[in-house]
Image: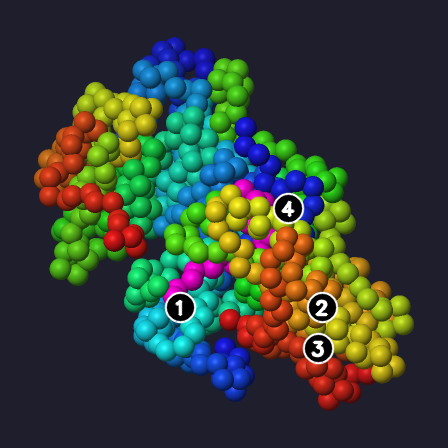
Amino acid sequence: MATRPVTGEQRAFMTGNEVVAWAALAAGADIMYGYPITPQNEIMHYWTRMAPKYERGFLQTEDEISAGFATVGGVLAGKRAFTATAGPGNVLMQEAMAMAEMMRLPTVVVVTQRGGPSTATVIYSQQELNLTCFGGNGEGLRIVYSPSSHDELFLYTIKAFNSAWKYRFPTFVLGDGYQSKMREPVTIFDPEARGITMEPCHPMVGLPGLPGEERDPAHLRNTYNLEDELYEVLMTAIKEYEAIAPQVVEWDTYAVDDAELLIIAHGVVSRAARAAVVSLRERGFKAGYFRPVTLKPFLAETLRPLAARARNLLVVESAYGQLKRQVQAGLYGLETPVTGYLRPGMGITPEEIVEFVHAKELI
Amino acid sequence: MRPLKLKLEAMGIKVLGWETRQVTGWGEAGTVLHPAVRWALHQEGDVIIDAGYGTAGAGTLHLLEGAGTASDLRVLAVINTARPATATVEDIIVHVRSLGRVDGLLNNTHLGEETTVDLIQAGARKVTAAARELNLPVVATAVMFELASFIGERDICGNPVRAIKRYMPMAFW
Amino acid sequence: MAIAAQPQMPRVWRAETKPHKFCPGCGHGIVLKALGEAIDALDIQERTIFGCDIGCSLLSWDFFNLDTVQTHHGRTTPVLVGIKRARPELVVVSYMGDGGAYAIGAQHLVSSASRNDLVTIIVVNNTVYAMTGGQMAPTTLPGQKTETTPYGRDASLTGRPILGPELVAAIAPPGAYVARGSIANIVQLKNFIQKGLQNQLEGRGIAFIEALSSCPTNWHTNAAATWRFVEKEMTAYFPVGELRTPEEKAAGRLQEVPPRGFQS
């Protein structure tokens, strides 16, 4: 019987990629399928070194297409399977994720965003929001978490497995190259130590009993013959997705009660946004910050009353409007003007945000 | 690395290694040895070699000319017990044994900005216990400048304390 | 089904979904019968997982009393490899057409062969993309007319037919089982498939069986012409027989030497 990788809680100092590997171990992930692409490679490096000790599996596949489809196979078999990718690999991964969406498969994918499109940079961006939230040829019935610290990267990687298996929508942890590579203190923990019970896994194929005699065989498909058949299947999934949204959505706010300027950011950029708000408040400006932790389902209804009270909204992101578009779509009808500080592929500092706020007279 | 390199050179330390613009495009394969580094052991004076990133840094040491025979060469394994892979005495022993030639250990237990004296001392105990088992000396315990005065000249196991000033936050990659 | 004479069916076939959906004269029914008989003979119904591709093979999604997953085009093998690696006690069968196996799924085939993945792959070769209306496929014969080669396949522009079993036979490590059968000889085909399943059960390596098959719908042939195409014209390009068996030793030329690493 293999030992538990993490007991109780431990304070540690490590890179984001190592955090993901430890979180997957702590969550009881059974197997990782992966393919090399910067900046997530170390997830595989750490996993392959630690997996044998804890009797977990690994297969490096021939590309991200097969990594995605092998992950699909792993969850069909009833195991906590996951993969990780970035950039062009994320593009290839979408085919398998579309299948996972249609068939309600609890896949977990960690995405470490890099510059895009195409090969671009291996470094950092927030340009894979569109792809990770909507990349399949469907309606985007997915759960997407955007962590902003190593503590959150650890927590939400564990939560991703639970949300995936509980709600049966493909689930993603949307990190980025900066988080992957930087070192900071983090508390790693055994989920039990924090009262988190891991959601049990059930196979969809290879069920017990003789198929056709002791039970019906599982005949799983992602294809339909007629419009009506598809419509019915989709609407059932959509209704379920909308019903579970309130249980899944998470967000964070700071100084919003009397905020005249509401700054909206996600992931690692939200640290700069929060620092900018602190800095503005220190000089008497009434700024506030809203941070979606779940990008999907998107929490338009939570944001709406906060946005309505403000005089200006500023969306800050390392992309050219991917978050801003979601905000605008979600808040349609609201008259509060929305401005964007949009820096695709670039890191963003609190000072830049403050300078922009004043330059555009947003407050 | 460039601002760091300039700063160290201003202090009289010659830094051998690539400049960022020379290695742009090499991606994560960038552990290609700079020719000056390869022959570093043949240079006059003290040479400090920092080898290691991720899980396989120690391997590059074998590529240095004269690494097998240099009599003055000391290979130190720098251990941070706040890294889970080297968090217990057993793990430290396994890790050090996997490195090949090691002449001593150096306790570098820290949590960045959150480092405390207790943490460093707890780390010292583990590293010293591992060193005993490995039959290796603990050369020193590294302590950030700001905390050094709280510990003194020796750590709780009697190892010498080296106060260090951190420059690395200036570099990203 | 209350009909006078019940056709003989393998036990593992699901009676409720018969008659099946394949065209009259389609070879799939015969290949699936050979597969069914092999599964029955080995008594592995309880733990066999059947995967099918896109195209006509998709019509087998509810064919068997087996847990089945229909995948994306060319991705059947990686999905089943994912299942097998997660639960090695299951027996996985990857059922594809020539387009899924040799065009869009070729890289997966190459890698699975190299890894000697414990999967039994059956490729139904009918020289066309049938479900989509009969376009040229990797195994279309030179001179053969298809929807995208209306004047006959020009090998100088589009290449020659891919020899899938030969490809797998060339690269798979020892322990692999590779064969090509035909619907024209169902007993032989069933034996090949059974050996292929056996190969997986014994943990020896990959099993790959191509089956020469028919598509009168897209060939626009009558019964006589259909059989002539399968038995005479296809076999001229695709020889029938076993190419690799697991007992063979590796050929002598390559020497396997473990890497020395840094230590001199």
Judge depth for marks 3 and 1 and give the one in front: 1
Residue reaching furthest to the right: A258
Q: Which residue is mark 4?
A: A158
Q: Is residue B78 magenta?
A: yes
Q: Which residues are magenta?
A: B72-90
Q: Is residue C248 magenta?
A: no
Instruction: Check residue A272 in the rendering and tell me which mark sits there, or answer none.
Output: none
Judge depth for marks 3 and 2 and give the one in front: 2
Q: Which residue is mark 2?
A: B149
* Chain containing mark 4: A
Q: Residue at x 53, y 59 (%)?
A: B139
Q: Which residue is mark 3?
A: A350
Marks 3 & 2 on one chain: no
Q: Secondary structure at mark 4?
A: helix
* Chain containing mark 2: B
User: Which numbered disc flags the more N-terminal residue, 2 or 1?
Assistant: 1
User: Which numbered disc flags the more N-terminal residue, 4 or 3?
Assistant: 4
* Chain containing mark 1: B
Does residue A234 show up?
Answer: no
